[in-house]
Image: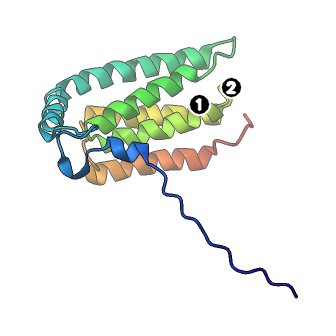
Amino acid sequence: MNQRPPEQVEIIHRINRIKKKVAPGGNIEAPGFINPEHIKNAQSVVEKSEDTYKEAIASTLEKLREEWEAVKTSKSGKNTDEIHRLSNHIMDMASTYKYELMDYFGHSLRDISAKIDVKNKAHQTIVQAHIDVMLVAYAQNIKGQGGATAKELKLILAKAIDKHELENTDD
């Protein structure tokens, strides 16, 4: 058996350009440094604008409800892209202001919106259940995890999804 002598391994240290853009050790002269005061100020702006969340969510929920009615009654088989967009918007706003339950419902509706067969009564029930629990979460101004009420609303939604199985295509 012919064995080759071990070859020298050359280690090449590549320049990590992204790493260089981040300020090492809080060096304010380094590229990519973000002043902690700016972060604190930005967070303050978000916290002060929380009142706009309530108005924006109310408006978006109303648009979602109207769009769902239009999708359900459309003879042309109107698609659910707007349902997806509105639920994604709800999810984004809710996560920004720490309305975790609303974020959860928005995320769930967004994820199923691509699978919805609008003519399927079971799918209609599932979407309506999402809208209903979102309206309750909004009306009760549930923030954070939401405690017992949130658990109950999640359970209601889970039962609707389990009972009507989103994959089911029978009417």
Q: Residue at x 38, y 24 (%)?
A: 61
In the foreground, 21 or 51: 21
The answer to whether 29 appears left or right of 137 in the picture is: left
Q: Residue 156's x, y, as percent?
A: 45, 47
Q: Residue at x 63, y 13 (%)?
A: 74
In the foreground, 52 or 155: 52
Q: Residue at x 88, y 88 (%)?
A: 1
* Residue 124 marker: 1
In the foreground, 27 or 133: 27
Residue beneath label 2, please? 119
Please say if 134 is above or below 161. Answer: above
Residue 137 visible:
no
Say what secondary structure mark 2 lies in: loop
The image quarter in which residue 135 lies: top left
Q: Which quadrant is the C terminus positioned in? A: top right
* Contact check, label 2 and label 1, Cβ < 8 Å: no
Q: Residue at x 21, y 22 (%)?
A: 52
Say what secondary structure mark 1 lies in: helix
Q: Residue 15's x, y, as percent?
A: 45, 49
Could you tell which of marks 2 and 1 lies nearer the N-terminus? 2
Q: Residue 98's x, y, as percent?
A: 26, 41
The answer to whether 103 appears left or right of 130 in the picture is: left
Crowdedness of circle 2 by 10 Å Cα count: few (<14), some, many (20+)? some
Residue 65 visible:
yes
Please say if 130 is above or below 26. Answer: above
Going by the numbered disc 1, the residue's amino acid type is Gln
Q: Residue 51's x, y, as percent?
A: 18, 26
The image quarter in which residue 118 lies: top right
In the foreground, 60 or 25: 25
Going by the numbered disc 2, the residue's amino acid type is Lys
Q: Residue furthest right?
A: 1
